[in-house]
Image (spheres, rainbow, N blue to C red):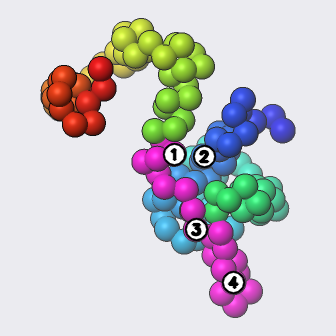
């Protein structure tokens, strides 16, 4: 499969795009998913999306129920957990776990707004609080 990833327990790029549709729209028909993926630049046939969803169901990523003649699919994977797993895998595979190196490259590649910088500072402040010695759950 052309869009496979090194870790078979992680969704491929195309599977992730289908999951994003389901996370944004909730339960959706194959046609709805195909149309939304096409709107995002992936011109996929209905049968291709149906096959994709069937494979995703076998992997435990989605489930479906029948309503009349249509199948309605829903995501079984949680969005935040999936993104966290993908980010951790990417960080490890590409940067050998070096967060500072990743951030340098990420910040060089995108100009951040004042709001985004404020959010980053808040996340860093929270991470500092969590890592203080003697704090329950802190990592040191």
Residue in the image at 49% along x and 31% along y: 87
| Quadrant of the rendered image containing residue 118 | top left
Disc 1 element: helix
Residue matched to label 4 = 66
Callouts 4 and 2 close, C-beta under 8 Å: no
Q: Position of residue 58 (x, y in %)?
A: 76, 60
Q: Position of residue 33 (x, y in %)?
A: 62, 62
Residue matched to label 2 = 16
Separation of disc 1 and disc 4 at Cα?
26 Å
Residue in the image at 66% along x and 73% along y: 64
Task: Compare marks 3 and 1 and give the one earlier in the sequence.
Answer: 3
Callouts 2 and 1 close, C-beta under 8 Å: yes
Separation of disc 3 and disc 4 at Cα?
12 Å
Q: Position of residue 45 (x, y in %)?
A: 78, 57
Image check: 106 left or right of 2?
A: left
Which contiguous range is marked in magenta? Answer: 63-83
Q: Quadrant of the C terminus?
A: top left
Residue in the image at 42% along x and 48% along y: 80
Q: Nearer the viewer, residue 130 or 49?
A: 130
Disc 3 element: strand
Foreground disc of the pair 2, 1? 1
Residue matched to label 3 = 74
Separation of disc 2 and disc 1 at Cα?
9 Å
Task: Compare marks 4 and 2 and give the one earlier in the sequence.
Answer: 2
Q: Position of residue 71 (x, y in %)?
A: 69, 77
Determine whether 2 is above or below 29 in the image. Answer: above
Foreground disc of the pair 1, 4? 1
Q: Which mark is residue 82?
A: 1
Separation of disc 3 and disc 2 at Cα?
13 Å
Q: Nearer the viewer, residue 118 or 131?
A: 131
Separation of disc 4 and disc 2 at Cα?
23 Å
């Amino acid at each position: 499969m052309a869009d496979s990833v090194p870790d078979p327990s992680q969704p491929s790029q195309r599977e992730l795009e289908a999951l994003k549709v389901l996370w944004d729209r909730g339960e959706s028909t194959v046609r709805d998913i195909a149309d939304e993926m096409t709107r995002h630049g992936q011109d996929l046939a209905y049968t291709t999306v149906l096959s994709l969803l069937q494979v995703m169901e076998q992997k435990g990523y989605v489930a479906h129920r029948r309503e009349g003649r249509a199948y309605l699919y829903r995501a079984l994977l949680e969005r935040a957990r999936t993104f966290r797993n993908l980010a951790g895998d990417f960080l490890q595979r590409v940067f050998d776990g070096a967060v500072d190196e990743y951030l340098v490259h990420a910040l060089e590649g995108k100009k951040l707004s004042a709001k985004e910088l404020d959010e980053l500072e808040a996340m860093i402040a929270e991470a500092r609080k969590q890592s203080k010695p003697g704090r329950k759950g802190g990592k040191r």
